[in-house]
Amino acid sequence: MSNYFVLSSGREIGVSRPCFIVAEIGNNHQGRFELAARMIEEAASIGVDAVKFQKRHIPSLLNEQMYNMPYKGRESFGDTYGEHRKALELSIEEFARLKTIAEERGLVFFASVWDEKSLEEVDSLGVEIIKIPSADLVNIPLLRKAALLHKLIILSTGMSTLEEIDVAVNEVMLCHDKLILMHCNSSYPCREEEIALPVIPLLAKRYGVVVGYSGHEKGIAPSIGAVSLGACVVERHLTLNREYCGTDHKASLTPREFKMLVEGIREVEKAMAVKEKRVFDSEKQVSLKLRKSIVAAKHLSPGHVLEEGDIVAKSPGYGISPIHWDEMFGKIIQRELKKDDVIMWEDIK
């Protein structure tokens, strides 16, 4: 089982690699190509590794009843749910242009596919990653067709039981092991007490695959914390204005917030680089000033045998450490020591 994957650009995704940070544009482009292109530009300036969109073929996605379900309100783009979803779709030709824009700026482009038709269209773009959203973790026909493409699959696990994830993972593994699981809570926005970050190492241990985190919380701290628990991928929604119409904006980050997220993740990565306990050179200078040495508590003459009351622990820390306190008693003073003189090993025998 591979613990990392290499894209054609040379970018690596996985364990002991820099966290792969994804700006999820999703449908926050409001169905407008120009806004989608602008969001890619913003994502590139933030310093993310990839941009992700969502692709739906509405006739394949919804039955007639669901299409015609009334869907009016502030967040709606149409009178019915089908009209709403249709208004937010970009064509596959527009996706191709957006992919070019992203790659010219050094970003990986990929998309969540919500149905088999969308899978075929997105695959035709030559993407290296296929994203399966949480809603389709249980969609066995879609999973099977995606796995047969032998591309890296990123699979979100929101609103799923471990038993459902077992089935989905098995379906992909029947074809290949190029799989990344994303821990996720599918509520928008997600309450902090329902994020359950410890599930990240649980998934990694249970399935032996690379694990990431797809966050829908309002803030950024949980997404940064996910990296310290082993998330190799972090995905968050990007918005240019949280007041835009649409439900995803409330769980999205503005460019300024997203930049803070990227910086925070990179700081955590640096903080996790050393995995064993050690004393750094920078600490040794601090130690000389703040640590204590064993010093003479009073005037001590050569030949004196040390006993209680002869010594005390005081700074600076360049002499015998008080960790050797009990070893000192019974030792013989070799030279004259004045009160507060730091005792060195050569001063005793």
Image (cartoon, rainbow, N blue to C red):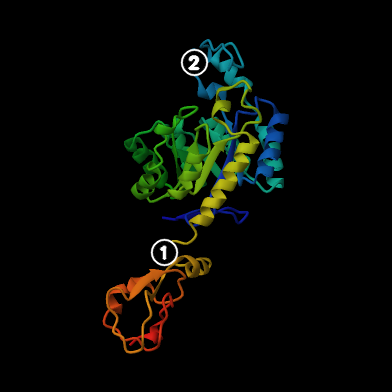
Rendered location of residue 178, percent (x, y): 47, 49
The 10 Å Cα crowd at callout 1, few under 14, some 14 to 19, many 20 or more, is: few
Give SS at disc 1: loop
Q: Residue at x 50, y 14 (%)?
A: 64
Residue 150 visible in this rendered orientation of the protein: no
Rendered location of residue 247, percent (x, y): 55, 23
Q: Give the quadrant of the N terminus.
A: bottom left
Q: Are marks 1 and 2 in contact (CB under 8 Å)?
A: no
Q: Amino acid at mark 2?
A: Met
Q: Which residue was labeled with disc 2?
A: 66
Mark 1 vs mark 2, CA separation in Å: 58 Å
- Left or right, 163 with respect to 111, comes to left
Q: Give the quadrant of the C terminus.
A: bottom left
The 10 Å Cα crowd at callout 2, few under 14, some 14 to 19, many 20 or more, is: few
Q: Amino acid at mark 1?
A: Lys
Q: Which residue was labeled with disc 1?
A: 277
Please tell me which of labels 1 and 2 falls first in the chain: 2
Q: Residue at x 49, y 55 (%)?
A: 4
